[in-house]
Amino acid sequence: MLTGIAIILDTIAVCYWAGFRNTEGKDERGAEILGKSSSIVLMLFIIGFSIITVTNLASPFTNVQFQDAFILCFSAVVIGNALSIMYYKKRI
């Protein structure tokens, strides 16, 4: 259930990112917004991957749990990217 919602939100977030990149991402302001959001996305990925790794070492995941963890990590990255673009779009 949670992964289904995450996939739907991922689709919306990717469409928002692609729309921004195609319309506003080509000028200097858009490039600055994409650059700042990329730094946030990198940190989200590192934090998510670290949490998954530490949790897996403490209590090994089953295959389904591992898939769900990576889906949620990817979702956090994609949704965080769209939200940071929205945030910086208003700030810059």
Image (spheres, rainbow, N blue to C red):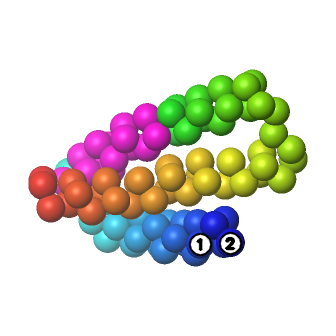
Q: In this view, does 47 lie above or below 79?
A: above
Please state which of residues 85 and 50 is positioned toward the viewer in this rendering: 50
Q: Which residue is drawn at 68% across and 48% down?
A: 70
- Name the quadrant containing residue 11: bottom right
Q: Are marks 1 and 2 in contact (CB under 8 Å)?
A: yes
Identity of the amino acid at label 1? Answer: Ile
Where in the figure is residue 60, as x and y percent of width and height? 81, 33
Q: Residue at x 68, y 72 (%)?
A: 1
Name the front one of labels 1 and 2: 2
Please state which of residues 31 and 36 is positioned toward the viewer in this rendering: 36
Q: Could you tell me how far apart the alpha carbons at marks 1 and 2 are, in whole angstroms?
A: 6 Å
- 36 in magenta: yes
In the picture as drawn, the residue positioned furthest to the right comes out as 63
In the picture as drawn, the residue positioned furthest to the left comes out as 91
Circle 2 crowding by C-alpha within 10 Å: few under 14, some 14–19, many from 20: few
Element carrying mark 2: loop
Where in the figure is residue 52, as x and y percent of width and height? 65, 36
Where in the figure is residue 23, as x and y percent of width and height? 32, 70
- Name the quadrant containing residue 7: bottom right
Circle 1 crowding by C-alpha within 10 Å: few under 14, some 14–19, many from 20: few
Q: Residue at x 59, y 72 (%)?
A: 5
Q: Which residue is drawn at 83% across and 53% down?
A: 64
- Name the quadrant containing residue 40: top left
Task: Decide whether the magenta segment is chiefly helix, strand or loop.
Answer: helix
Q: Is residue 1 left or right of residue 82?
A: right
Numbered tag placed on residue 1 in the rendering: 2
- 80 in magenta: no
Identity of the amino acid at label 2? Answer: Met
Q: Mark 1 points at which residue?
A: 5
Q: Can residue 55 be seen in this view?
A: yes
The range drawn in magenta is 29-44
